[in-house]
Image (tube, rainbow, N blue to C red):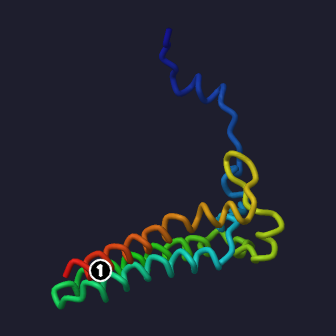
Amino acid sequence: MAERLTRQVVAEKAIVLDEPALSLPTSVDRTFELPAGLYVGTAASYFGFLGVMAVGFGNPGLIVPMAIFIVFVAMFFAVPAMWMKMGPLNPQQLTSWSRFQQRGVMTPYGRSTAGAAAVQVLILPVLILLWGLAAVIIAAVVR
């Protein structure tokens, strides 16, 4: 069962360190081991979708929502870029494309090849862009 411990008993049993262990410098990799080209491709697909929607369904009433969408997508990429550079000082940089092709990327289920990782990263943004193109084409045909 539980018993009540007084401060004195805890102080006698406790091990107190003079320096906290958290003051040690840490190095954290926040790059996800992906090259900049994959981020650019993802951003281009999302912005391409917004452009297709703006051109296909151009309406003055959509200026404010489109501006909000553009700001959100821009921040979707800006915040992780700032997070990668925040302290503690990290020596990591984005992986080069050649290193990415040689080593691939480590996932929770094992190492993935560069091609498989690129498909996994880009499939949703490209499908969203194609969905937007299909919606605009269908709307143009129906008119």
**Would residue 51 appear left or right of 29 to someone viewing this image?**
left
Residue 48 in the image, given as x and y percentages of width and height? 44, 82
> How many C-alpha atoms fall within 10 Å of the one at disc 1: few (<14), some, or many (≥20)?
few
| Type of the residue with mark 1 | Ile
Nearest to the observer: residue 83 or residue 23: 83
Residue 76 in the image, given as x and y percentages of width and height? 45, 73
Residue 107 position (above or below residue 127): above
Name the image quarter holding the C terminus: bottom left
Farthest right residue in view: 102
Residue 93 position (above or below residue 24): below
Which residue shows up at 61% across the image and 75% down it?
A: 85
Q: Secondary structure at mark 1?
A: helix
Residue 95 in the image, given as x and y percentages of width and height? 73, 73
Q: Which residue is mark 1?
A: 68
Which residue shows up at 37% across the image and 86% down it?
A: 51
Farthest left residue in view: 61
**Would residue 25 appear left or right of 9 to someone viewing this image?**
right
Farthest top residue in view: 1
The image shows a total of numbered marks equal to 1
Residue 24 in the image, given as x and y percentages of width and height? 72, 58
Nearest to the observer: residue 104 or residue 27: 104
Which residue shows up at 58% across the image and 65% down it?
A: 121
**Would residue 137 appear left or right of 63 to someone viewing this image?**
right
